[in-house]
């Protein structure tokens, strides 16, 4: 009797642990989804406020800036200024007077050169931080 009773308690403990672990993982997944949605909204807001990032696929600082947005970077208005860019992008970079990348240009004509924190971009545009 003792051995089977021990197995039952052990099985109940395992089920309880598994339930808690699944609940925790589901909560983490929901939090990550919520954070991703907030970052998507932030990136979309920057674009709606006419913020444009000029960069180069060859530039490590530009890569670091893109990483801040993760998958949400796809919503950022981005112009590629590398020698391998499309002719219209190269012309846009020249027209904008881009000398260093990354460079952010905002709807009011202001510009920031170098990697910008999300807070700096938020302060410049009024977009809500994720």
Image (cartoon, rainbow, N blue to C red):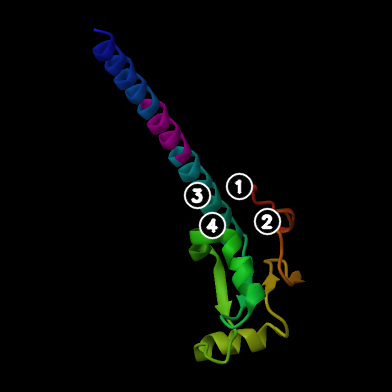
Which residue in the structure is indicated by mark 1? 130
Question: Which residue position is annotated with label 4?
Answer: 44
In the displayed orientation, state which residue is furthest to the front. 2
Q: Position of residue 11 (x, y in %)?
A: 30, 21
The residues bearing labels 2 and 1 have C-alpha atoms spaced at a distance of 9 Å
> Is the residue marked by circle 2 packed among few (<14), some (14-19), or many (20+) residues within 10 Å?
some
4 or 3: tag closer to the N-terminus: 3
Which secondary structure class fits the magenta region best?
A: helix
Q: Label 2, secondary structure: give it.
A: helix
27 magenta-colored: yes
**Residue occupying the point 69% across, 71% down:** 105
Q: Nearer the viewer, mark 4 or mark 3?
A: 3
Which element is circle 1 on?
loop
Residue denoted by label 3: 36
Q: Are marks 4 and 3 in contact (CB under 8 Å)?
A: no
Specify the label residue 118 is tagged with: 2
């Amino acid at each position: 009797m003792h051995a089977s009773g021990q197995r039952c308690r052990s099985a109940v403990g395992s089920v309880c642990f598994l339930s808690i672990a699944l609940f925790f993982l589901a909560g983490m997944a929901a939090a990550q989804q919520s954070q991703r949605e907030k970052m998507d909204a932030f990136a979309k807001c920057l674009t709606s406020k006419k913020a444009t990032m000029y960069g180069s696929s060859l530039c490590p600082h530009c890569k670091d800036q893109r990483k801040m947005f993760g998958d949400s970077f796809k919503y950022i208005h981005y112009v590629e200024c590398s020698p391998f860019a499309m002719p219209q992008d190269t012309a846009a970079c020249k027209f904008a007077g881009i000398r260093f990348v990354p460079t952010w240009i905002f709807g009011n004509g202001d510009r920031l050169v170098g990697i910008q924190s999300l807070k700096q971009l938020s302060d410049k545009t009024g977009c809500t931080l994720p």
